[in-house]
Amino acid sequence: MIRSRVLTMLSLVCLFALLLAGLSGCGQATQTPQAQPSPTSPQVGQPTSSSVVAQPTATQPSPPPTGEEQAPKSVVIVIPEDPPSFNAILSDTGYDAMVMELTMLGLTDIDPQGNIFPELAAELPTVENGGVVVDEEAGTMEVTWKLRQDVQWQDGTPVTADDVVFTWDAIADPETGTWMQGVDYIGGVVKVDDYTFVISYTGIYPGYLTQFGGEQLVIWPAHYCDAEQGFTAWDCARAPMSDGPFTLQEWVVGDHMIFVRNPNYYQPGNPVIDQVIVRIVPDATVRKTMLLQGDADVDVWTTEPVVFDLKDKPNVQVSISPYPRWVLRLFFNLAANGTVDPVASPHPILSDLRVRQAIRMAIDVDTISTQIFYGYGTPVWTELFRPPYACDVPRPKYDPQAAAALLESAGWIDQDGDGVRECHGCLNAKEGTPMEMELITYAEFGEPMTLSQQLIAEMLGKIGIKFQLTVVEGSVLWATAEEGGIEQLGNFDVDLWDDGYSGTDPTDFLWELYSDEAAEPDFGWNIGRWINDDFNGLLAQAYTLDEALRKDLFCQMAAILDEQVPSVLMFSVINADAHSTRVEGIQSTTFDMVTWNAEDWDVK
Amino acid sequence: MTAYLARRLLQTVALLFLLSIVLFALVNLAPGGPLAGHGQSRHVRPERAAVLKRQFGLDKPLPIQYLVWLAGNDWMKVDADGDGITDSYGTRKGILRGDFGFSFRTRQPALNEIGLRLPNTILLMGVTMLVAIVVAIPIGILSALRQYSFYDIAATTFSFAGQAIPEFWLGLILILIFYVWLKNPFTGEPLLPPGGMYTLGAGFSLVDRIKHLILPVATGALAWIAWYSRFLRSSMLDVIHQDYLRTARAKGLSERTVIYRHALRNALIPLVTVLALDLPYLIGGAVFVETIFSWPGMGRLYYQSALQRDYPVLLAILMIGAAAIILSNLLADLLYAYMDPRIRYD
Amino acid sequence: MWRRFRRHPGAIAGTIVLGLIVVAVLLAPLSPYDPEASDLSARFQPPSLQHPMGTDALGRDLLTRVLYGGRVSLTVGFLVVAISLAIGVPIGALAGFHGGRLDSILMRLTDIFLSMPAFLVLILLSAILREVDAPLFERNNVLTIAVVIGILSWMTFSRLVRAAFLTIREMDFVTAARCVGASNRRIIVTHILPNAIGPIIVEATLGLGYAIIEESGLSFLGFGIQPPTPSWGNLLSNAQEYLTKYPWLAIFPGLMIFLTIISVNYIGDGLRDAFDPYKVLKKVGEV
């Protein structure tokens, strides 16, 4: 009858929902990882990557386990999302580099002061010590690397030149490899003996020291990673074999990762602590609370408002990088909006140098930095502000009156009294063109970026330039021209975003943003189409190993940039990691993630 | 009936096929793409973009991409190493054989990404729907029985209010009340957690899980309770005035029997149908709640994937969602026929 | 009909509240504050006499921004309803009137749209259409968002109208009109539509509420109206990170949405009772 059917249906539905809920709640299916090394040394644990059917995020953690004897010294790091893998060069989220630093080593690394130091390498090869041999005529060079002989993988296998060659072959594989900086310059990597190998370059590549190290690249184990799967997809990037201070013991995706001390680590006495626990906590407020309550020890990439909140707390310290990386900047499109040729169709307003100079003079950088970034923004006005190439460029004045006067003399006068200037005898625009433009920024940074955009527009509005504000997604702003990328297609007037080069070598970065070759769509990122022959000439010369010469060249380039104003650099955002005072040794660095020296951390 | 069923299933297949084309076109039409700088790099070097394009299969014209997505490319030769020569067979099997490709973001199979998060969403939405039903039925019944009484007016007002409160706002307000303002009188700590599925490292504790479920479920269920209770009320009202109930009363049956044995069961029929129609929400219905309460589910995965143009994952979620809708429609129709013998399909 | 509406207390209250909101929103330019100009000396102030709803991160008066945001949200809402009607009514009318093949095709079309997970596709569509740089459609325009939402909300109308047509076209007065020789168009416009208009109006009213919530939701996620243009949705999204310190930023915009939607719902309910006291057309799945 109807009634019984209805009742049956209803109860079935309820049961079903309850069952689902119960199953989902209780179920913890642990899958064993595909690749497991068999440890020869009995003390070392196996790296397990349990891709557990997600039991993700949580809030407050429980107090650390109290053992009968000494509790293991452990440090808890909280991050907002899982690293996609341990291979930082693939996805470059930063969290991958963070866990990579805990477990694997590169040839070299960079310290917070910008000094390069050897990790797997026995010493840094230079021209002086014969490690680097330059063939001046042919314009090529060869670098001979000697590896340390006391480094082992966690299963006891020594780290040898085979691993380096293996890593290189995997990267260079046309099917499953990837592209990395300077890969075109490498002719080949050849093993000489177990601990020596030679990299031959097809040109002079000044960044050779950190090419296989630094923040992004480490050496991968030849005997463990599967070359068939390839660099971009191999399982050892999810279940890594370690030669670093810690090994991965457990990874519950979405919840936590546990790293334990690697007893085979080559540095005696290091790592000092026994365990590093990484917890996934997406909400920034919760991470802050955990830090304050002692449930977390390190909060990675702490943002300005949180740093400000943590200022006076007795049990929390904030480590700030001595040199920041990300600088907020305005880029001018010197070609007309929607075009890419600055000569055939120059931008009616921005192609005039005086206009760009006026804009630079009218922006009160300090106000933006104090009001929106809690005072933690460091003014930066040149690309060359970090060691070892910090150049002495005088800071641009903030003088809105002078800016207004400059605009007047450039032929931009407000004759109709509406607060917006028009062209009356200006350089490249028709008579009467109003000084109106579009200022674009991207959404993913968050509110501080859009608020800065607004403030900048207001400041420029005061000198008679009207801006229409647009916020777009990063994936649209930086897409290729083919995909409709706004920058590449030149569909903008002024672009506001944060950028900065990684590592210590700005050569590639400068090429990307300012060289003439890079002005071609989808060939580089000189989206302003600024072309300066002097600059290009200097840049070409910078591919040399003569450091003194390089510094001189860079500073000349900095002077040109300062004079020609293709972009206005304003200030850098903070690079900081908040941590509990019980952890010693934490030092934020702009050249790496906070775990760069995890082997030296200690717990009080 | 079987003929009807067969016809409907065929229609389902056709509909899914058409939808796959529409959704594929939509996803690819969105400006911007997965090659835009992610992670820390703002700008992707063109050389790297070229390699990625090839590895992601984006270097082919759209119709070919669709074909590969649908049926795979292991039956045709592709140029895997970028030298311009198609010399090896592809590796993809296509969705017809269950291969939804790999996520651009993590390089893991798209279905894996979904599989990690689907149970969480089902848990959240399942409990939400359950709570909604359990709370809505008594409210709706009483409302109908005591029509125009104070109780009814209160319930109706509540129902209107519940449907008017935006979910995302409600979530924020609830966090404000139960995490920021009200504190546990004994421990001084916040009453309820502001997000996450459970407290870290404490092992499995039912109480803990429930505490973490309270706010998200309350946020999601309110509108549903409002809607279901009102729906049940109107459906109950329809039934109450029917003649066969008058007959039952005339036969001398107690009011209780009349209501619960006869009226309620018939009133529940439309509700069950509506429930079946709402089943797809189990999969994709919690975008706001998941975002606000840091609940790692399908909604947040979709949102992340949309921002980063992670096409395979996007398409997988869309197709699963669409399939859920179509199948639940079919289920609703069948249920209706099953429960109400007056309905017959031919 | 109006008499019945007037007897519905909720609908009256709803009309009054909605009326007040619309008037307030129209009067937004009267505010002494500029919704977009910053005042860095007055950041994050709690509600006071000078700033009845407080100020936000740039010192902008929240009440002013909420009112301007109301303009945007309400405009989008009305536009969405207009677009949905413009698409849905003709489709439903054609399907219901002619029946047969055309009906099948149009209903399949409706099914395709109905089978798409609505909100997920909304996110995609807005990502697509937002960047369109065409006349009338400038980037991030109110019209664009309205079109995006409208494209996915016409299906209810087409079903409703089709159902109405199916029922009414069999009625005697239509047959009579046909006997007299009235053309198809005349029959539709003069005879059927006026009788079907009841449910359409009710649904349109409720659709307004739905559209406002969808727009707010999209803007909340960052896919709708972008800053600095305020909309109730993106005001809420900006308020999320300040929830613990400056809660008024979250309370007021949401309150406005709530008041608007509940008024709209009560009005819709009143209209439903006024037009349809015998509940001729059921809502659950038969047609």
Image (spheres, helix red, strand yellow):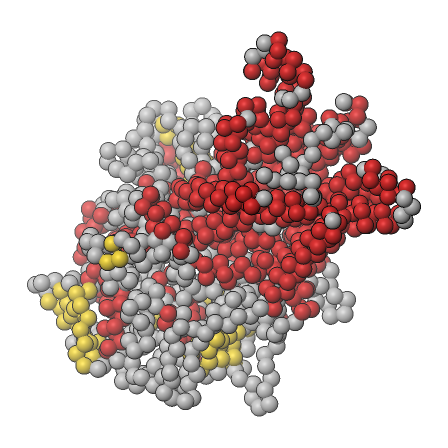
Taking depth in this image into account, of C30 and C230 the one nearest to the observer is C230
Q: Is residue B4 left or right of residue A568?
A: right
Is residue B99 visible in the rendered structure shown here?
yes
Percent position (x, y) of residue B309? 42, 50
Residue at image x 44%, y 50%?
A: B315
Occupied quadrant, residue A407: top left
Q: Is residue C1 left or right of residue B63?
A: right
Where, quadrant-wise, is the N terminus of chain B in this rendering?
A: top right
Taking depth in this image into account, of C114 and B253 the one nearest to the observer is B253
Taking depth in this image into account, of B142 and A192 the one nearest to the observer is B142
Vertical comparison of C83 with A386: above or below: above
Taking depth in this image into account, of A342 and B230 the one nearest to the observer is B230
Percent position (x, y) of residue B182? 73, 60
Residue at image x 74%, y 28%?
A: C276
Residue at image x 64%, y 40%?
A: B344
Percent position (x, y) of residue A158? 29, 83
Toward the left, the furthest residue is: A137
Label count reads 0
Occupied quadrant, residue A177: bottom left
Occupied quadrant, residue A62: bottom right
